[in-house]
Every structure is written in C-alpha cells, then in structure tokens.
Image (cartoon, rainbow, N blue to C red):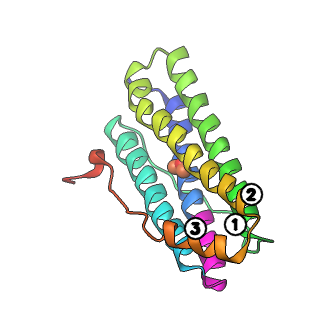
Amino acid sequence: MKNQKIIDMLNEQLNRELFSAYFYTAMEAYFESLNLKGFAHFFMVQTKEELDHARIFFNYINKIGGRVYLKSLNEPKNEYDSPTEVFELALKHEQFITSSIHEIAKMALEEKDLTTYSFLKWFIDEQAEEEETMDNILRKLKFIKEDPSGLLFLDKELSMRVYVQPAILQNE
Ligand code: FEO
C-alpha cells in the first residue's frame, strides 16, 4: 500500500543525492584548479556514484507508485582552503546522508513498510563504506600534513579509483 509519508522522505533523499553530486562536482572543480588530477578524478567518480544513488531512489519511488518531484539545488561551496578541508566537509556530508537514510529506515519500520526497509538496507551498507572512504583519505591528508610529495603520492593513488555501476542499475 502506498505510504505518502515514506514517499515524501524518499523523494527528499533523491534530491539530497542529486545535491551530493553537485557538491562533489564543485570539489572536482577545486582540485582541477590545483592541477591535482587524481583528486579531481576521485570526485568525478564520486559524482557518478551519487547520480546512481539518485537513480536508484527514482526507480524505487516509481515502482511503489509514487511521483518524483525535483527541487532546486543550493549552490555548493566552491572555494576551499585546502584538500584537508574538502575531505572534512565530504566526510561531514556523508555523515549527514547516513543519518538521513537512517531516519527513513526508522520511519519505514515504524510504519511497518518492510519493503522500503529492505530496499534501504543497501544504502545503509553503502553509507558505511562512503564514510570509511572519506575518513581514510582525510586521515592520510592529516598524516602527510599536506606535504607536496605526499600530496602527489596520494593524487596518484586516487587517480586509480574505478567507477563501478551498482548491480541494481545494470541491465536497465
Ligand atoms: Fe549517496 Fe555519498 O551518499
């Protein structure tokens, strides 16, 4: 049965995923401006992942008979003091997204909407990974204290990030 309260929360989350893509594209642009191509590549891949997340919510809302509504996106922060600041904000943002998804999952349980709860499990696991990824890089940045040779080493490592489309979106 259609639960409008849950559909509204899912719709809000879809918009948050789109904002995440927008935010990470701004971070990509910042690293391009520093000529740190590996960091820029990392955020390009991250942006694709966020668009995938939005698409997964889009498909699910339609599947359960809801209507997707897009909202306006806020301007993301474009200027940063340092690569460390970027990852501090990226981690903070992922923590916000995690709590937002947890709120929907809790509401789905409260409303006895176990189908949505089951759907959200993938996101709960994904968010743990997202936070871990941002935190790992942040800790490395703090460790090297943004020493130029350390930054270039990390830039090379991040240039190797590979985009993988989630299985749920394959064969669409
Ligand atoms: Fe889609 Fe990074 O949360």
Could you say where residue 62 lies in the image, as x and y percent from the top left?
35, 43
The reply to whether the magenta stretch includes residue 27 is yes
Q: For the residues marked 1 and 3, what is the alpha-carbon distance in whole angstroms?
A: 25 Å
Labelled disc at residue 154? 3
* On screen, residue 153 above or below 170: below
Could you say where residue 112 lies in the image, as x and y percent from the top left?
46, 14
**124 sits to left or right of 81:** left
Residue identifier under label 1: 76
Q: Residue at x 65, y 72 (%)?
A: 151
Q: Nearer the viewer, residue 6 or 43?
A: 43
Q: Amino acid at mark 3?
A: Leu
Comes first in the chain, label 1 or label 3? 1
Q: Amino acid at mark 2?
A: Lys
Residue identifier under label 2: 142
Q: Residue furthest left?
A: 171
* On screen, residue 68 above or below 29: above
Q: Quadrant of residue 51?
A: bottom left
- Residues at marks 1 and 3 touching, judged by CB atoms closer than 8 Å: no
Q: Quadrant of the N terminus?
A: top left
- Magenta stretch, residue numbers: 22-35
Q: Secondary structure at mark 1?
A: loop
The main secondary structure of the magenta stretch is helix
How many other residues sit within 10 Å of disc 1, few (<14), some (14-19) or many (≥20)?
some
Q: Nearer the viewer, residue 139 or 23?
A: 139
Comes first in the chain, label 2 or label 3? 2
The reply to whether the magenta stretch includes residue 163 is no
Comes first in the chain, label 1 or label 2? 1
Could you say where residue 132 lies in the image, as x and y percent from the top left?
57, 44
- Residues at marks 1 and 2 touching, judged by CB atoms closer than 8 Å: no
Q: For the residues marked 2 and 3, what is the alpha-carbon distance in whole angstroms?
A: 12 Å
Q: Residue at x 54, y 79 (%)?
A: 37
- Residues at marks 2 and 3 touching, judged by CB atoms closer than 8 Å: no
